[in-house]
Amino acid sequence: MTTLNEVLREIDRRKHFVLTSHSRPDGDAVGSVLACSEILRAMGKTSEVVLRDGVPHIYRSLPFASTVVQASWVEDHYDAAILLECDGIERTALKGLEDRFLINIDHHVSGRPFAHINWIDPSACATAELIFRLARHAGAPISADVATCLYTAVVTDTGSFGYAGTTAKTFALAQELVLAGADPVKIAQQVYFSNPTSKMRLLGAALSKLHREGNLSWMYVTREDMERCGAIEEDCEGLANWALGIENVDVALFFRELPNRRFRVSLRSKGSTNVAEVAEHFGGGGHHCASGCSLDGPLSVAVERMLAQVRIAMSNSSSVQ
């Protein structure tokens, strides 16, 4: 597997970079790609961030967020592309990456070595941790703005330091970022207390369809719900955690109807069950405690297929314990 030294060597050989991450970017994707771009600039490189879906509402106040280009393709004038937390080019939903020199940086257990250079470290709490290491190794400064982006990435990807995999090392990283200038209170208020009204209405619609079976819960929203609430795709981020917040529930699922009669499923776990394995079964992936995938409808079929696979995973985890 590629080492950090090899990543830096390939970066040193090139001047112009485009950075991107997966479609429907979350906090780790946005925070990491913004920080990495600024770190490259500090290393004397030129860089531009291109995201297929742009920056979600709750992350638009982050430093450098206004410089992100929302587009469906990548121009030709870059020496290389750096893809953060993607398991393949297709996850970016961008055209124009196919014939470029690719650097893949990821921390997911489902990460795949699809690029020319692949630095994948599942021991990291977030991709942001890898970007922090890259900066330190390169001797690039961690400014207050960069620290803000990285801290946002860490706090969101660890579920506010609540997911399995959060260790003393995670808090040591958070401490370094706060000492570098990240304001944890301001960041928490922006991420958790600045939701649009449409998201709160959608949450109500989802909770009205909450189901529970022992220590498994699930809920869903239809396209009609989305339209009635005036909600957009990014309003669905984090809703699965509300179903997981029920006492004695170990795994929670959130189904969102897509325009093509498929369903996007967010899976969350309190740690005893590896939901990444469930997502991978349906062509998705992610973390042990947070993952996602898509599968065909109708809803009743999608739910039953997913529940069947989750039951198997929960049974297997119980037998191991």
Image (cartoon, helix red, strand yellow):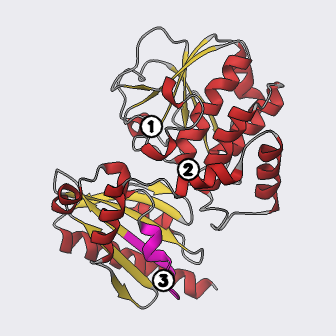
Residue located at (47% from left, 8% from top): 77
Near mark 2 (Cα within 10 A), the count class, few <14, some 14-19 or many ≥20, is some
Q: Which percent across, then down, holds residue 196?
A: 38, 53
Q: Which percent across, then down, holds residue 147?
A: 72, 38
Disc 3 from disc 1: Cα separation: 30 Å
Q: Nearer the viewer, residue 213 or 209?
A: 209
Q: Amino acid at mark 1?
A: Val
Left or right position of 296 against 93? left
Q: Nearer the viewer, residue 27 or 95?
A: 27
Left or right position of 207 against 141? left
Residue 12 occupies quadrant = top right
Q: Which mark is residue 55?
A: 1
Residue 197 occupies quadrant = bottom left
Left or right position of 143 against 57? right
Q: Is residue 282 above or below residue 35?
A: below
Q: Are marks 2 and 1 in contact (CB under 8 Å)?
A: no
- Of the residues tagged 2 and 1, which is closer to the observer? 2
Residue 124 visible in the snapshot: no
Near mark 1 (Cα within 10 A), the count class, few <14, some 14-19 or many ≥20, is many
Q: Which mark is residue 246?
A: 3
Q: Which percent across, then down, holds residue 227?
A: 18, 55
Residue located at (61% from left, 25% from top): 37
- Among the two numbered marks 3 and 1 on one chain, the one whose residue lies closer to the N terminus: 1
Residue located at (35% from left, 22% from top): 73
Q: Which mark is residue 176?
A: none
Near mark 3 (Cα within 10 A), the count class, few <14, some 14-19 or many ≥20, is some
- Among the two numbered marks 2 and 1 on one chain, the one whose residue lies closer to the N terminus: 1
For label 2, the residue is 190
**What segment is highlighted magenta in the picture?**
240-253
Q: Are marks 3 and 1 in contact (CB under 8 Å)?
A: no
Q: Amino acid at mark 3?
A: Ile
Q: Quadrant of the C terminus?
A: bottom right
